[in-house]
Image: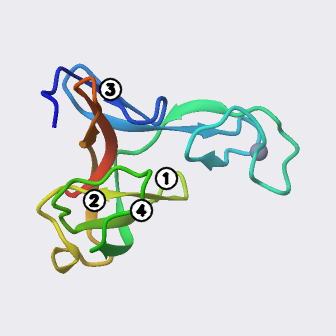
Amino acid sequence: MPEVTSQEPAIDGWFATDEAGSAHLIGSKCPECGTYVFPPRENNCPNPGCASDTLESVALSTRGTLWSYTENRYPPPPPYPAPDPFEPFAIAAVELAHEGLIVLGKVVEGTLAADLKVGMEMELTTMPLFTDDDGVQRMVHAWKVA
Ligand SMILES: [Zn+2]
């Protein structure tokens, strides 16, 4: 694995990190009906009763409630990157009460399904997904127990 020289999001525009190092997700909100969307997009309000075709970028809550979770014990098939040797990891579906959204994400290393319970408070963070051939560590949003 190449030496890490910098960090970049694996997908641009899904989260931002403030000067103190705290991460928040970037979602979209309909200015007409208030419906939130994640991942963010610029148009097409998902509310079938709303005709708005403009969505605004907003910061989402950094804490939510664990709605469901699972544990992935097998590496994904190529072309998806997976560490070798593969380590099992948990995936959490976290409900953001204010936004009425459920956001999927990996759970930080060291926390597996046995450590999780529906209803727990979870907090957003980021974690490396993989390091590319240029030494850029690609980061994704992740959940940790609050
Ligand atoms: Zn709307």
Q: Nearer the viewer, residue 29 or 88?
A: 88
Q: CA distance from mark 4 to mark 3?
A: 23 Å
Check residue 122 in the rendering and tell me which mark sits there, or answer none: 2
Q: Secondary structure at mark 1?
A: loop
Image depth: mark 2 or mark 1 in front: 2
Q: CA distance from mark 1 to mark 3?
A: 28 Å
Question: Are circles 4 and 1 on residues that touch, CB within 8 Å?
Answer: no
Mark 1 closeness class: few <14, some 14–19, many ≥20 residues within 10 Å: few
Q: Which residue is mark 1?
A: 98
Res. 4 image quadrant = top left
Q: Nearer the viewer, residue 39 or 1?
A: 1
Image depth: mark 4 or mark 1 in front: 4
Image depth: mark 4 or mark 2 in front: 4
- Kind of residue at disc 4: Pro
Mark 2 closeness class: few <14, some 14–19, many ≥20 residues within 10 Å: many
Q: Which residue is mark 3?
A: 8
Residue 131 coordinates in the image, percent (x, y): 25, 36
Mark 4 or mark 2: name the one nearer the start of the chain: 4
Which residue is drawn at the image coordinates 29% and 32% (left, top)? 132
Mark 2 or mark 1: name the one nearer the start of the chain: 1
Q: CA distance from mark 4 to mark 2?
A: 29 Å
- Kind of residue at disc 1: His
Quarter of the rendered structure image containing ligand 1? top right
Compared across the picture, whether 33 is left or right of 59 comes to: right
Res. 40 image quadrant = top right
Mark 4 closeness class: few <14, some 14–19, many ≥20 residues within 10 Å: few
Q: Which residue is mark 4?
A: 77
Which residue is drawn at the image coordinates 70% and 34% (left, top)? 55
Is disc 2's CB within 8 Å of ligand 1? no
